[in-house]
């Protein structure tokens, strides 16, 4: 029986293990961490004949080598054991690639990009589902891709949010439709150079039969037609801003499609049908409509799905209102660009809560947006002292280091009244790992604190 080793006991790793085990492999899961939860999962998987080694990193001794190594999305592609595996010619793939091998008879929409992926993916899935198709969202959102492959009945379409990590560890993944939402520096601690990061993302689109690009993204627009001659481009600024003679654009409050150079433009859906705020969400709408139309979805299903779409948790998510002040959870803004978009999308003046575990990147646009739109800034987490210093350097002094979310919420309400701000916005511009397991837990904590605080007034 062939042997496979899986690195990482998250949702993806477990699904990969179950899929391989079903297909007749002997499976071993390795995770260097150990905890109550992991021990419980270890016992549960033992009943399924899946061996789990906790507090253990995979080692490749020259005896009894696995034929296959599957890597969970968060595991870096260049750790020593994976480099050694490739030198030993052991097949090494990501969990997304494994899923693709069992799902490639079905058409995929693959969505990648620095920001905007999750909203675009969720909206695409909602549109395909409104058309009566079984089209689960998976990858970085919803199910692990291997969970979809494990289903008794395979879906009609697979809607995959695919990160650079997942593309990097995929060999043959080739969607029917590829969507590239935005491109700005991120994950450079992992990918080292912007060019390397770009090339990884580009691989997914090169492998896609049909390609959709955000034509309003400065970087993508610049590489534009020279690299992507046959793609569909989008623009929220109207037809004259499309960089090619086919694509999707907004004009007079409607989304229009122009599927060929000679086609007459057709109105698809009113922009006002979408409940989410911000120009970036109009761009997400355009890319979702493009994917749907290229997937031959009827206009009626698109209109219905767009008007019913509630938005994505932790991305400019409305929580509650107190004394005319809206509390907004944008915990998913884990880098400067996403946080800048967050501030640009809400009414100003706003009280901003920011901080966490800082990432490399260019903070100038974000700082300028703070100067223009934030009445005050409350800083939490490890990044607080560095952020305070940066705010001082640009001449913004209405900030306070409050360290924790428990301190930030009541203080933000007090400041909102003082400065007559209409919005309290959690938009951290940081990862969450200094204080929380992930951005979702951070957002949930913020939501709970806001609701408790307002409830006690």
Image: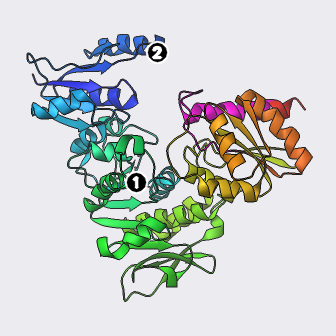
- The residue that mark 2 highlights is 37
Q: CA distance from mark 1 to mark 2?
A: 31 Å
Q: Nearer the viewer, residue 144 or 303?
A: 144
Q: Residues within 10 Å of mark 2 (few under 14, many from 20)?
A: few
Q: Which residue is mark 1?
A: 112
Q: Quadrant of residue 62?
A: top left
Query: Is 420 on the left or on the right of 234, as rendered?
Result: right
Quadrant containing the C terminus in the rendered view? top right
Residue 302 is marked as: none
Q: Residues within 10 Å of mark 1 (few under 14, many from 20)?
A: many
Q: Which element type, helix, strand or loop, lies under badge 2?
A: helix
Towards the viewer: 163 or 317: 163
| Residue 323 shows in this picture | no
Left or right, 432 with reference to 370: left
Residue at 81%, 39% in the rendered image: 412
Q: Where 276 sits versus 450, above or below?
A: below
Asked if residue 359 lies in the magenta stretch, the reply is no
Q: Is residue 448 magenta?
A: yes
Q: Position of residue 36 (x, y in %)?
A: 47, 11
First reached walking from the N terminus: tag 1 or tag 2: 2
For the magenta stretch, what is the residue range?
A: 426-452
Of residues 239 and 50, the one drawn nearer to the viewer in this rendering: 239
* Residue found 31% across the figure and 60% down from its top: 205
Taking the spot 59% from the left edge, 44% from the top edge, the residue there is: 429
In the rendered image, the vertical position of residue 323 relative to residue 85, given as above or below: below
Residue 372 location, quadrant: bottom right
Quadrant in which residue 347 is drawn: bottom right
One can see residue 248 in this view: yes
SS for dot 1:
strand
């Amino acid at each position: 029986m062939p042997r496979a080793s899986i690195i990482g006991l998250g949702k993806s790793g477990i699904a990969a293990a179950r899929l391989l085990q079903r297909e007749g492999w002997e499976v071993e899961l390795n995770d260097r961490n150990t905890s109550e939860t992991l021990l419980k999962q270890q016992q549960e998987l033992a009943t399924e004949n899946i061996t789990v080694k906790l507090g253990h990193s995979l080692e490749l001794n020259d005896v009894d080598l696995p034929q296959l190594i599957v890597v969970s999305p968060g595991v870096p592609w260049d750790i020593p054991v994976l480099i050694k595996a490739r030198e030993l010619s052991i097949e090494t793939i990501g969990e997304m690639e494994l899923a693709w091998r069992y799902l490639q008879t079905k058409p995929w929409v693959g969505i990648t990009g620095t920001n905007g992926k999750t909203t675009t993916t969720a909206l695409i899935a909602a549109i395909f589902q409104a058309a009566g198709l079984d089209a689960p969202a998976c990858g970085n959102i919803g199910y692990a891709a291997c969970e979809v492959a494990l289903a008794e009945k395979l879906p009609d379409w697979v809607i995959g949010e695919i990160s650079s990590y997942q593309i990097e560890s995929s060999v043959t993944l080739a969607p029917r439709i590829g969507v590239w939402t935005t491109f700005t520096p991120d994950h450079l601690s992992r990918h080292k150079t912007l060019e390397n990061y770009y090339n990884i993302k580009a691989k997914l689109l090169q492998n896609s039969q049909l390609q959709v690009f955000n034509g309003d993204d400065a970087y993508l627009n610049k590489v534009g037609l020279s690299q992507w001659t046959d793609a569909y481009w989008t623009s929220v600024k109207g037809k004259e801003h499309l960089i090619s003679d086919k694509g999707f654009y907004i004009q007079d409050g409607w989304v229009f499609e122009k599927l060929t150079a000679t086609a007459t433009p057709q109105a698809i859906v009113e922009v006002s049908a979408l409940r989410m705020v911000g120009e970036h969400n109009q761009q997400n709408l355009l890319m979702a409509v493009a994917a749907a139309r290229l997937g031959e979805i009827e206009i009626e299903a698109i209109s219905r799905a767009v008007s019913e779409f509630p938005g994505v948790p932790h991305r400019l998510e409305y929580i509650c209102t107190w004394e005319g002040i809206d509390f907004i959870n944008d915990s998913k803004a884990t880098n400067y660009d996403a946080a800048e978009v967050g501030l640009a999308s809400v009414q100003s003046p706003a009280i901003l809560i920011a901080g966490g575990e800082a990432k490399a990147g260019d903070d100038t646009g974000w700082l300028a947006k703070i100067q223009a739109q934030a009445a005050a800034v409350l800083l939490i987490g490890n990044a607080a002292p560095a952020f305070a210093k940066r705010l001082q350097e640009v001449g913004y002094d209405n900030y306070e280091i409050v360290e924790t979310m428990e301190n930030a919420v009541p203080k933000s309400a007090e400041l909102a009244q003082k400065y007559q701000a209409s919005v309290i916005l959690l938009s951290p511009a940081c990862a969450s790992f200094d204080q929380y397991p992930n951005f979702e837990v951070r957002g949930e904590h913020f939501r709970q604190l806001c609701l408790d605080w307002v409830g006690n007034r």
